[in-house]
Image (cartoon, grey):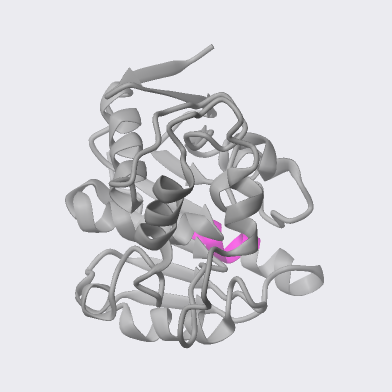
C-alpha cells in the first residue's frame, strides 16, 4: 500500500488518473479519509470527477480512522497536517499542483497556502469550515467523537487533547488563517458556499470577498446547481493548469 514515513508518522495516500496533479482533502473533520469521498456528504468526488483529466492524489489524514497514523502532542495544530501534506508532495516529486478540499479541507488548503504558496497553481474550497462569533466553552462535540476513537494513543491525555483542540479552533474565522492572510493570498481560488453551522454561509462569502483572485458559487449541492458547479470547477482547474 502506498504510504510515506516522516517524523514518526505514517501517511497513506492513493493516486488516480494522469495529468497535472490535484491534492485533495476529504470532508468529515478530523475523520477525513479517502473513503469519505464516496459518501453522499461529498457531492463532488474528485477521484471520479477529475481523474480522466488530472492526476488526483487522495489521502487519509493522520489518526482519522483510516490508514494514516501519527503521534499526538499538545503542540500539534494545522502546521502538523500541512507538514504531512508537504511530505506527500515531496515524496511524489510534485513541484506544483492544484488543491481541492471540502469542509476541513478548506482549512487544510489555507494552511498549505501559508506554508508553500509557490507550490499551488489554484485551490477549490468546498463549504469551508469556520466560526462566526465567540468560541463555545469546552471541546466541540465532533472533536470529542474523534477523540473517542483514539484507543491506541495513550499519549492523547485530556490535557493534550484540550491543547490540540485550542490550537485547531481557538483562532476562529477559518481557523488556520486570519483575515489578513486571506486578503493577501494571490493564489486563484474557487469557493463553493457552505450553508450550515459547521460550514457557515457568511464564512464562505467573506472568504470569497477577501481573496483577491476568487470566484464564488453560492449554491451547488444538488440538482441543476450541482451539475453546473461540476462544469465550472473543471473549467476553473483547466484555466489555471500551467501549460506544459
Q: Is residue 140 left or right of residue 236?
A: right
* Residue 218 vs residue 151, the one in the foreground: 151
Q: Is residue 243 left or right of residue 12?
A: left
Q: Give yes or no for residue 177 being in the magenta stretch.
A: no
In the rendered image, which quarter is residue 183 located in? Answer: bottom left
Determine the main secondary structure of the stretch shown in magenta.
Answer: helix
The residue at the point 31 percent across, 77 percent down is 211
Residue 27 spot, x, y in % from top left: 60, 52
Residue 24: tell me if it is visible: yes
Residue 240 spot, x, y in % from top left: 35, 57
Q: Give yes or no for residue 232 being in the magenta stretch.
A: yes
Q: State the count of labels.
A: 0
* Residue 157 vs residue 136, the one in the foreground: 157
* Residue 242 vs residue 77, the one in the foreground: 77
Residue 89 spot, x, y in % from top left: 31, 32
Q: Which residues are magenta?
A: 230-235
Image height check: is 85 above or below 127?
Answer: above
Residue 38 spot, x, y in % from top left: 73, 42
**Residue farthest along the top direction in this orientation:** 1
Amino acid at each position: 500500500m502506498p504510504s510515506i514515513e516522516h517524523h514518526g508518522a505514517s501517511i497513506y495516500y492513493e493516486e488516480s488518473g494522469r495529468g497535472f496533479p490535484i491534492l485533495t482533502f476529504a470532508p468529515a473533520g478530523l475523520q477525513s479519509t479517502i473513503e469519505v469521498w464516496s459518501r453522499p456528504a461529498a457531492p463532488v468526488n474528485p477521484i471520479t470527477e477529475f481523474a480522466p483529466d488530472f492526476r488526483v492524489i487522495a489521502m487519509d489524514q493522520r489518526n482519522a480512522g483510516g490508514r494514516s497514523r501519527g503521534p499526538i502532542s499538545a503542540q500539534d495544530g494545522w502546521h502538523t497536517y500541512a507538514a504531512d501534506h508537504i511530505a506527500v508532495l515531496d515524496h511524489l516529486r510534485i513541484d506544483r499542483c492544484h488543491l481541492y478540499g471540502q469542509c476541513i479541507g478548506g482549512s487544510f488548503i489555507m494552511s498549505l497556502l501559508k506554508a508553500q504558496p509557490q507550490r499551488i497553481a489554484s485551490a477549490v474550497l468546498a463549504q469551508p469550515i469556520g466560526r462566526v462569533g465567540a468560541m463555545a466553552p469546552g471541546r466541540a462535540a465532533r472533536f470529542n467523537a474523534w477523540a473517542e476513537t483514539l484507543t491506541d494513543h495513550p499519549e492523547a491525555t485530556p490535557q493534550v487533547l484540550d491543547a490540540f483542540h485550542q490550537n485547531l479552533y481557538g483562532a476562529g474565522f477559518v481557523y488556520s488563517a486570519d483575515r489578513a492572510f486571506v486578503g493577501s493570498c494571490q493564489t486563484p481560488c474557487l469557493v463553493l458556499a457552505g450553508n450550515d453551522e459547521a460550514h457557515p454561509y457568511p464564512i464562505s462569502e467573506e472568504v470569497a470577498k477577501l481573496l483577491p483572485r476568487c470566484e464564488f458559487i453560492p449554491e451547488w449541492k444538488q440538482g441543476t446547481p450541482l451539475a453546473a458547479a461540476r462544469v465550472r470547477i473543471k473549467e476553473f482547474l483547466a484555466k489555471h493548469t500551467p501549460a506544459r
